[in-house]
Amino acid sequence: MTYRLAPIDTGAFAAERDDTGLTVVGSVVQRSDARGHVTGRTEFFEDVAPPRLAHLKMHRSARHHARIAGVDVTAALAVPGVLRVLTHADVPNNVYTVLKLIGVEPDDEPVLAVDKVRYLGEPVCAVIAETEAAALDGAAAVEVSYEDLPHVLDVEEALEEGAPLVNEYQGQNHFVYEGHHCRRIRFGDVEAAFARADHVFEWRYQSSPIEQAPVETTGCVVVPQADGRLRIHSDTQACFFTLDNTALILGTPFNRLRIVGGTVGGGFGGKVDVVVEPIACVAAMAVDRPVKFVYDRAEEMQVSSPRAAERIVIKDAVMDDGRVTGRKVTLYVDAGAYARHSPYGTTKAAAHLPGPYSIPNVWADCHCVFTNRTPSSAMRGFGVTIADFALESQMDRIARALGMDPLRLRLINAYRDGDVKAHRKIAEGTALVEVIQKAAELAGHDLPEDCRRMSSTTREGL
Amino acid sequence: MAKLRGRGFASVNYPTGMNLGGDPSQALIHATTTGTFVVSLSSVDLGQGIKTIAAQCAAETLGLPMGNVLVDTADTDTGPHCMGTFASRGSHRVGNAVIMAAAEARGVMLEVAAEELEVDAADLETDGSGYIMVRGAQDKRVHVTDLAMAAHFKHGRTISGRGVYLKEPSVPVPETGEMDPDSCQAHACTVAVVEVDDETGVVEVLELFNAYEVGRALNPAMATQQVEGGAWMGVSHALFETTEPYYPLRDHGPRDFSAYLMPGPADIPSQHSVILERPAANGPYGAKGIGEMTANAPIPAIANAIFDACGVRLTSMPFTPESVLRGLDALRMEEPC
C-alpha cells in the first residue's frame, strides 16, 4: 500500500520535537473505515431497515414571511397510505434553540410552524405514511393559506429602523450579547491609530451562503423499543448533543432515548443542528412504528442550514514601513430566521480577529443578524473561513498599495510567542513566520535574508 | 484575448476546540480476555478518521500494536459522553481522553504482568510488539494475549482505564471581548497559481503550495489528506459554490449537484505540501487538529492570484466567470481612450 504523503520538515522547531520511542503515533496506518467505504460494506443509518418502517416528509413554507391563516390537512389524510399528519400541537415543547445546552437563550425556533413562517422552506406539517411516495404525495396535498408579511433579506437593511421584525422570540433583528447589540472586541485605541497612521485603508467583502454538501443527506431512523424507549439511528455529528436536545423537545427523561450513530457520510458542520430527530421521534410515538425522516437533495441544498453569508468591512491603520497599527472590523453574519449556532459562530469570529497578526489597536463589532432566509449554522471553519478571505485579501491590497512584498508584510506583522492578542490571551506555540518561510521556499519565492532569519520565538528582524 | 497567469498568497491560523471551551469528551478502555483493548467512545467519524486517531493514541500509550486495539463508538447506551465532531476538537479532546484512559489501563497491565512474571512493575517495558518484558532481560516476558487471560482467570483483575479531557469554560467580558477561546492554534500558508481566461472569465487553479504547522501529524497520510482535500474545498468555495447565486435574493437556488457546481477531476490543481510540527503542550502527542482550517487559505490566495493575473480585485465570493468579466470590463472603462 502506498500513500500520498506530504513530507514532514523535521528541521523546523527541532529543539521542541521529541519522537523518542514512538511506535504508532507519527506512522501511517490505514484509516479504519477506508476499506468498508470503498467496498460498500460500511453500514450507515439508512441501512437500518426495521419491519413496519413508516416514512416522514415535510410540507414546507412557500413564503419568505407570512402569517398562517389556515392549515387544511384533509386532502393529505385522504392520500392512500398516509397514516397521520403532525402539526405544532403534536410537539410537546415545540419552540427550542439548540444552544440552550450551553446556556444560550431565548428559545426562538418552532419545530413546526405555529402562526407564522419566517423563511421559504420552513416546516409546517409532517406527514407520516406507509411509503416514501405516499408521504411525498401527502405533504404536497397539505393546503396552507398565507397572509403575506413584508420580509427582509439583507443584513444591513434588517438592522435599519423600521425593518420588518423577523423573529418575535428574539425581539429585534439581531442577537443580544449580554446587553450589547453585537459581540465586541475593544483593544487599544483604533481611532488614535488612524490619526497617527501614514495610510488608512478601508475595504468591504461579501460572501454568499455555502452548502456543506455531504454525500449522505441529514436523516434518522427512529425505532420504538419494547421497553418504551426510542432507539435513534442518526447521522448526527454529536450524539449526546442530539439526544439532549431531542429529549428537551419531547419533554421526556434523557434516558428514554438512545442514539446509535458514529459512521457518517460527510458532515462539514451541516449535521450539528438537531432538525430531523425530534419530529421523527414524535412521529414514531404517534404511530407506534419505526419512522424514517431523511432529507432529499433539494432539502439538503435549500432547507438545511448553510454556511452563513458574511459581510465584512475592514479599516486599517498602516505605517510606511508596513506595520499595521490599528484594525477596525465590522462583521455582519446572516443568521437567517433563527439563531441555531450563529450566536456561537459570531463569537468565534470575534475571537479570531484581527487574524494571525500582532496589531496593538483592534476594534470589532460582530453582528449576528436575523433575516427571512433559511437559518445558517455551523460549517467547517465556522466564523473563520470568510474572515480569512477578507483579512488576507486586505493584506494583499495593503502590500500592493505600499509596493511591498506580500510575504514581507505578513512577516513584519505576524504574531509571535508572547504577543498579547486582541482578546488579551498571550500567544504561545505560534508558527506563522515559519509556515510563510516554508511556503515561499516551496513556491520558489525569494525572501530576503532578514525575512529568512525571522522566527516565531524571537524578535529577530523586527 | 489571452490566458493570464498570476500568483497569490495567504497565511492563516486556526483555533483548536469548541470556542470558549466547556466541551468535554470521555474515553473508557478495557481489555477483553483476547488481549484486545476496546476503546469505548461516543465520538462520530464523519470520514475524517477519529476512529483511527483514537486507536493510534491508545496503541501508543498502551505500548501495544494497532491490532490489539478496537474502537467502539457512538452508541449513547454504551459509550461515555463526547461533545461531538466539530470545532477541530476530535483529535485534541478525544485523543487526550484516550491517552488518559490508556495510561491508567497500562498501569494495571504492568501491575498484572509484574504479578505474572514475579518482578517489580517498575522494571517492565513494552516495545509495541505485544510483549511486556523485563527491561534488560528481554526473554523474561509475557504476551498481552496470555496476560489478559491470566488477569481474568488467575489474578481476578480487570485491565481498564478511564479518561476525560475538559478545557474549562471561559466567559467573554462583554465590554472588551477578553476571553480564552482556544486550546492552541495551527498555522498555514498557501501560494496559489492561477490562470484567468480574459475572454470567458474562467479561472483555473493550476498549482497550490501548502505549508501547514499542525503540532504533530499523528497519522501523516491522514494529515496530508486533510491538507489536500481541504484545499479542494477551498478551490470549490472560491470559484463555484453558493446556495444563493443572487444573494441576498433567494432566486435560482440550486437543488441538486447539476446546478450546485464543484470542481471535477480536471479542475483539481497540482499540490505541493509540507508539514511542520511544533508540538502543543496540551495536545495529544503534541497534535493541534487541522480538521477545519485546510479550506481557508486557498480562498484568499486564489483571490490574490486573480488580481495578480488580471488586475481584477474580487471582493465577493464565489469568484464566478461573470464577476471576472465584469471586473475586466470595469478596468477597460477606466483606461484612457
Image (cartoon, rainbow, N blue to C red):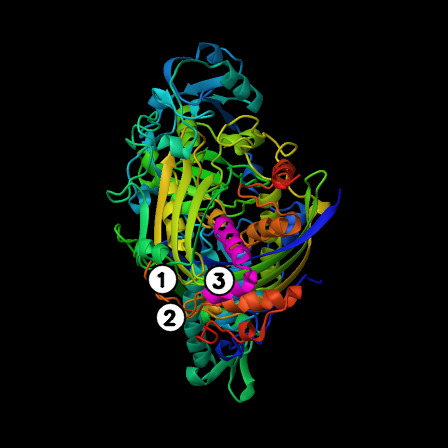
Q: Amino acid at mark 1?
A: Pro
Image quadrant in which you'd find residue A152:
top left
In the drawing, does residue B145 fall left or right of residue B102? right
**Residue B2 location, x and y as percent?**
75, 45
Q: Distance of mark 2 from mark 1, alpha carbons?
A: 13 Å
B282 or A244: nearer the eye? B282
**Residue at label 2?**
A418
Element type at mark 3: strand
Q: Is residue A291 above or below residue B67?
A: above
The circle on residue A360 is 1
* Residue B153 image position (x, y, % from top left): 46, 69
* Magenta-tinted stretch: A388-413
Q: Mark 2 belongs to which amino acid?
A: Gly
Q: Residue drawn at (74%, 47%), measured in percent from left and top? A: B3
Q: CA distance from mark 2 to mark 3?
A: 16 Å
Q: How many marks?
A: 3
Q: Is residue B310 magenta?
A: no
Asked whether disc 1 touches disc 3, contact meaning CB atoms under 8 Å apart, the reply is no
Residue A194 spot, x, y in % from top left: 36, 55
Marks 2 and 1, the one that precedes in the sequence: 1
> In the visual, does A390 lie left or right of B324?
left
Q: Which quadrant would the N terminus of chain A be assigned to in this image?
A: bottom right
Q: Secondary structure at mark 1?
A: loop
Q: From the image, tell me which residue sits under label 3.
A: B186
**Chain of residue at mark 1:** A
Q: Residue at x 37, y 36 (%)?
A: A369
CB under 8 Å between discs 2 and 3: no
- Is A65 rendered above or below residue A273? above
State which chain disc 3 sits on: B
Q: Is residue B68 above or below residue A19?
A: above
